[in-house]
Image (cartoon, rainbow, N blue to C red):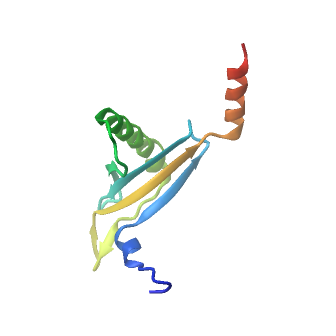
Amino acid sequence: MLNNFDTSYDYMNPEFDITVNNAYSNFYYSFSIFVDPAGQMHYGKPLTVFLEESRRISYTHLSKAVMESYLKYYLNLIPGKTLGITHTSEIAVHVTGRVASEKLQKSSLLSSLP
């Protein structure tokens, strides 16, 4: 352990920060993904607390859509292996979406028109 950091947590609980540039809107979602032995991803659960059930349902729906529309098409996942045996693994992702600055400028110009 260098500087009192234990790397076993990162190994057992991998966490990734992902930024999507030129997204359809600005967003931020944290959720878990299960990677099966075939390398396919499956939605796990939101990694945030909700005070209202309706908010949880909406958040889950939108974060699943982000996974299905961005992550499944642009990420190449390799399933986990232990002692040569491929198995399902859980990863945590924090996905930030950013609208292209050109889109943002156009939308702000349009909203300022009478």
The x, y position of residue 85, in whole percent, is: 26, 74
Residue drawn 35% across the image and 65% down it = 79
- Figure quadrant of the N terminus: bottom left
Residue 26 position, x and y percent, is 56, 40
Residue 62: quarter of image:
top left
102 to 1, vertically: above or below: above
The mark total stands at 0
Residue sticking out furthest to the top: 114
Taking 6 as reference, is 34 left or right?
Answer: left
Residue 6: x, y in percent?
Answer: 41, 80
Image quadrant in which the C terminus is located: top right
Q: Would you say 1 lies left or right of 35 here?
A: right
Q: Residue at x 62, y 39 (%)?
A: 99
Q: Is residue 29 left or right of residue 40?
A: right
Report the front residue among 51 and 40.
Answer: 51
Q: Quadrant of residue 102?
A: top right
- The residue lying furthest to the bottom in this view is 1
Whether 94 is drawn above or below 102: the answer is: below
> Residue 8: percent from the left, percent from the top?
37, 78
Q: Quadrant of residue 58?
A: top left
